[in-house]
Image (spheres, helix red, strand yellow):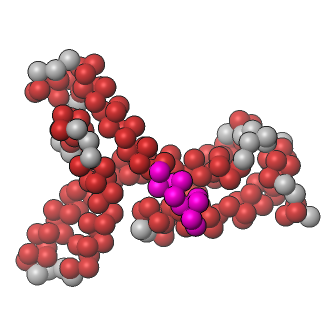
Amino acid sequence: MQNRLRDSELVVMMRGGDKAAFGVLFDRYYDLLHTFARHIVKDSSVAEDIIQNVFVKMWMRKEQVNPELSVRNYLLVATRNELFDYMRLRYNMLRSDINDAMLNVADGDTDIYDYVDVRERVGFIDSVMRSMPDKRREIFAMRYDRNMTNAEIARALNLSIRTVEKHVDLAIKQIRKTISVVTLFFVLFF
């Protein structure tokens, strides 16, 4: 019977602690969110972890979920945000993986397809970085490639800390905007 209820009714029930209503929402949207996440991260198990985090956070914040707003949009935005967090955390590791894979391919220790898979996953962030103005790209790389603090970057480039913070903030916003466009494309065409 709960399967026939509208999302707004299920949210009201979930806000009251109804785990079955939460389960219906999970079942209703899991495939859509998983497909979206898998499309971005290219790894089904990572996509599963991301979607699990989205639903755990929704349950933990259930009182804040507005039954008058679209649950579908809420979950897509939450998934987009989790994807952004995942990509930001994985950024340095992926760059390192590419370097390792290139060395292994050169040594003949690995299959070229391993290198191509890693390259595709990091390609998204690299393409966004290439579209950034030179100074912003340089500051973003110093912050996330070299793990430098904003103060260290400011000293190295003879800039104010506030200028460095602004460039990092703009770079992150640019990546988020690009993810939003990908999200919109996915929602419209998949």
From the top left corner, tell me how far across and down residue 27 is, in percent. Answer: 72, 65
State left or right for residue 15 relative to residue 79. right
Instruction: Residue 60: give x, y in percent of width and height.
Output: 66, 42
**Majority secondary structure in the magenta region:** helix
Question: Left or right: 74 with respect to 154?
Answer: right
For the C terminus, the quadrant is bottom right
Magenta residues (range): 181-190
Measuring from the top left, give residue 186's x and y in whole percent: 53, 61
Q: Can residue 50 be seen in this snapshot?
A: no
Q: Nearer the viewer, residue 135 or 4?
A: 135
Residue closest to the far right: 1
Q: Quadrant of the N terminus?
A: bottom right
**Residue at the left extreme, as displayed:** 107
Query: Residue 37 lies in magenta, yes or no?
Result: no
Note whether residue 20 is visible: yes
Query: Based on the displayed image, in which of its 4 quarters is residue 162 positioned?
Result: top left
Residue that appears at 11% across and 81% down: 108
* Residue occupying the point 73% across, 63% down: 28
Q: Is residue 35 above or below residue 108?
A: above
Image location (x, y in percent) of residue 64: 71, 35
Q: Is residue 83 above or below residue 24?
A: above
Q: Is residue 182 magenta?
A: yes
Q: Is 127 in front, or is 112?
A: 127
Q: Is residue 170 above or below residue 190?
A: above
